[in-house]
Image: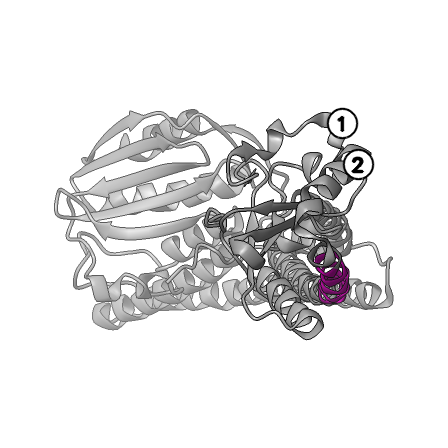
Amino acid sequence: MKRWWRPRTLRGRFVLIMLLGVLSAQLASYGIWSWQENRERLARLDALSRNLADSLAATVRYFSSLPYEYRHIVLDQLRDMGGTRFFVSVNDHRIELPHTSGGAAREMVASNLHDGLIRELGQQELHIGFSRPGDLRVFNNEVPLADLPAHWAHRSLTIVPLSTPILVVQMPLEAGDWLFVATSLPMAETLEHASWLAGDRLFVSLAVLLTVIGLSLWGIRWATRPLSVLAKAARRLGDDLESPPLAERGPRELRDTAAAFNRMSERIRHQVEERERLFSAISHDLKTPITRLRLRAEMLDAPAQREAFIRSLDEMDQLVKGALASVKGLDLHEQATAIDLDAMVRALVDDLAWHDEARVHLEGRGGWLMAKPLALKRCLANVIENAIFYAQCVRIELRRHPDHIHVIVSDDGPGIPAEQRERVFEPFVRLEPSRNRHTGGSGLGLAIARHIVRAHGGDIRLETAREGGLSVTLSLPLQH
C-alpha cells in the first residue's frame, strides 16, 4: 500500500525528517519555556500578593482607627490629593461583584490576601474578588469607575486597560458599614491565563522554523546532488556503454563511489566487447564446416539420408545466424536522434506486408520522439513481422500521451496462453503448438524487442487482443 505522506525521493525524505525534528524540538522547547515562565510568573505573583496583604492590612488598620465622623472627611481629602495606591470607600452594604473567570493565579492571590489579613487583623469575615474596570461600580454600587472625577487621579484604577482585573476586598465595620478597598496589581497581566499562542512567540517560532527549513533544503540539495549525478550516469550507461566516465571529485566517499562506478562500467564494456568478438568468431568458424558438410550431404545417394542431413545442417545454420543476430540486436552503440515514428511504422508496414496475404490496418499518430533509429526499427520490425507471420488481420495503433507513446500491435492469430507470455521473451523459445502457421524463426524476436524497448526506458506487454489473438503494447517514453 502506497503511503501518501512518504516522499519518493531521498531528498524529500531528508526534508521530512528535518521538518519533523525541527517541529518536535520547537514544540518541546516552547513547552519547557512556557512552563518555566509560568512558574516564575506565579512565584513573582506570590511574593507580590504577600507584600500587598501587609500594605492592605496597614491601610485597613488606619481607617478602622479613625473616628466614625472623620472617616468620610479623610477619604475626601485623600481623593482630592490623588496618588493613593488604594481606592477606599465606606458603603452601607456589601457590593456584589460580577462573576469573572478565575485561574490558579487569582486563587493564589486571593488565598495569600485572606491568610495575610487574618494574620494581621484577626478579621474573620473577608470577601475578596476580582472585577473588570468596565464592570466595577463604587459608592454603594451607584457610580461606575469610569465616571469618577479625573482630578481624583486614582491612577491605580482609572488608567488601567479595560481587560485588566481589579482586586476588591470588602470587610464589615461597626454600625453596619462595609469597608471597600480596590486596587490593581503592578503585575496585573500575570493574573490572566498564559497564552500558548501569543503573537510574539508564534512569530519567533515561525521565523526559526522557516529559517531552519530553508537552510536544510539548501544543505540537503547540496549534499544529495552527487547522488543525482550518479543516478544520471547509471541511466546513461544503461542506454549507451560508450558514455563518458563519471568525474571523481568531491568528498572521499563520493570519489570512491565514482571510481567504483567507472571500474564497473569499464568491465561491462570489456565483457560486451568480448562477447561480441566471441560470437563473431564462433559464427565465422562454424560457417565453413557447415558449408563443407552441406556439399558432402548433397553427394549422398540415399535421398532419405540426404534430406535428413540437409535439415540438420539447416537447423544448425539457423541457430548460428540466430546467435549472431541476437548479439547484433543487443548492440545499441548509436546516438539517439529525433525520429518520426509514424513514418517509420508506415515504411515497415509497406516493406513487410506487401508480399504477405495478411491485411494490416494502421491508425493513430505517434509523432516525433528521441530514440536510436536502427535499434527501434529492428524492435518494431520484429513485433510487426511476428503479427503478420501468425495472423490474417493485423491492426497497428499509435497513441501519444503527455509523457509516452504507445504502439499497439494486435492480431487475430492463435495468441499465446497467459502462463507462457513471460517465457516467450527468453532467447530461442518458440511456442510451436500454439502459434505455428508456418515453420521457421529462431525465437529471438521478442527477446530482442524487449531489450531494445527497455534500453530506451520503456517496456513491452503482452495481452489478449479483442480479435482473440495477441496484442503487443510497446511503451516508449518521450523524454529519456
- Residue 478 is situated, as x and y percent measured from the top left of the image, at 50, 35
**Near-viewer residue (217 or 107):** 107
Kindly report the secondary structure that dominates the magenta region of the rendered protein: helix
Residue at 66% across, 37% down: 161
Coordinates of residue 232 in the picture (x, y in percent) = 66, 50
Residue 454 screen position, x and y as percent:
48, 52
The segment highlighted magenta reads 44-61
Which residue is at the far left? Answer: 468
Q: Residues within 10 Å of mark 1 (few under 14, many from 20)?
A: few
| Tag 1–tag 2 contact (CB < 8 Å) | yes
Secondary structure type for disc 1: helix
Observer-nearest of 158 and 195? 158
Residue 151: which numbered mark, if any?
A: 1
Residue 59 in the magenta stretch? The answer is yes
Kind of residue at disc 1: His
Identify the residue under disc 2: 82
